[in-house]
Image (spheres, grey):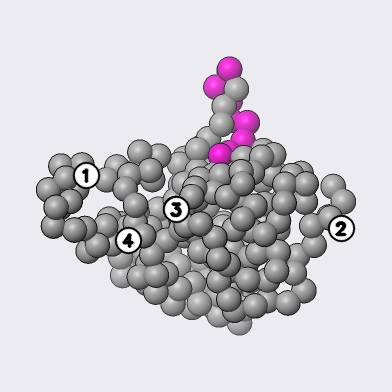
């Protein structure tokens, strides 16, 4: 694919993209991460149009503030055909950023074989960003100074010692906590009766913003 149509920005701008955060960003990729489909919300948030991104690798929107170990864990889970949630800071065409929570669904053919992935992304509350960003900054600094392996070892130790859970569960629980904090009195009983479920049902439950 000729990537001249979709260059990565030459300058990083510390400014958030303005987009409709009530929308769900959707993309479909093959097993190698090549973009096959993107919806209008993806265009708005990324500031790329469909002609520019179809056929391109999904990592074209990877922000340099993101530690590589997060994507390593993500791809290891997808290769095992496991659903996975991740909190990601993405890079727009103009060099700005937007934070999202992603849920992945495995696409299969009639024989049940994995053929690709559908990613659905929603905006996340500032309170979640404030909790995850320091961890990502530490991982990135270790990666840059000591290498990717050292960053991965720290990440594993952090999850084991400080949160006592895997990354996917850690991400989901962050949202459960924020849902509980932001629930209005009239919705508390409903939220109690409708416990969040990990996976696609959980992802589409409620509005965190």
Mark 1 or 3, closer to the camera: 3
Mark 1 in CB contact with mark 4 (< 8 angstroms): no
Residue ID at (30%, 65%): 163
- Between the C-alphas of marks 2 and 1, the distance is 47 Å
Find disc 3 in the rendering and name its residue.
Answer: 22
Left or right? Give the position of 181 relative to 99. left
Residue ID at (66%, 40%): 37
Say which element carries label 2: helix
- Position of the C terminus by quadrant: bottom left
> Is 170 in the magenta?
no
The vertical placement of 107 against 42, above or below, is above
Q: Position of residue 149 (x, y in %)?
A: 57, 68
> Is 111 in the magenta?
yes
Q: Position of residue 196 (x, y in %)?
A: 27, 45
The vertical placement of 186 against 198, above or below, is below
- Mark sitting earlier along the chain (2/4): 2
Find disc 4 in the rendering and name its residue.
Answer: 174
Mark 3 or 2, closer to the camera: 3
- Between the C-alphas of marks 1 and 3, the distance is 22 Å
**Residue closest to the eye, 181 or 167:** 181
- Between the C-alphas of marks 2 and 4, the distance is 39 Å
Q: Toward which corner of the image does residue 185 lie, by quadrant?
A: bottom left
- Between the C-alphas of marks 3 and 2, the distance is 32 Å
Residue ID at (64%, 58%): 46
Find disc 1 in the rendering and name its residue.
Answer: 195
Mark 1 in CB contact with mark 3 (< 8 angstroms): no
- Between the C-alphas of marks 3 and 4, the distance is 19 Å
Find disc 2 in the rendering and name its residue.
Answer: 4
Left or right? Give the position of 15 relative to 193. right
Mark 2 or 4, closer to the camera: 2
Q: Is residue 31 visible?
A: no
């Amino acid at each position: 694919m000729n990537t001249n149509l979709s260059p990565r920005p030459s300058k990083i701008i510390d400014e958030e993209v303005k987009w409709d955060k009530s929308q769900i960003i959707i993309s479909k990729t093959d097993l190698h991460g090549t973009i096959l489909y993107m919806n209008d919300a993806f265009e708005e948030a990324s500031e790329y149009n469909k002609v520019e991104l179809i056929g391109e690798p999904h990592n074209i929107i990877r922000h340099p503030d993101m530690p590589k170990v997060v994507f390593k864990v993500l791809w290891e889970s997808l290769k095992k055909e496991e659903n996975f949630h991740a909190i990601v800071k993405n890079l727009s065409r103009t060099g700005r950023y937007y934070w999202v929570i992603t849920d992945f669904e495995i696409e299969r053919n009639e024989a049940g074989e994995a053929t690709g992935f559908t990613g659905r992304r929603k905006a996340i509350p500032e309170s979640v960003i404030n909790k995850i960003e320091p961890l990502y900054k530490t991982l990135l600094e270790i990666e840059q100074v000591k290498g990717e392996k050292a960053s991965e070892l720290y990440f594993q130790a952090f999850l084991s010692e400080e949160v006592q859970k895997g990354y996917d569960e850690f991400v989901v629980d962050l949202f459960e906590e924020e849902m509980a904090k932001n629930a209005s009195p009239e919705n508390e009983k409903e939220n109690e009766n409708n416990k969040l479920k990990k996976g696609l049902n959980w992802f589409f439950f409620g509005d965190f913003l």
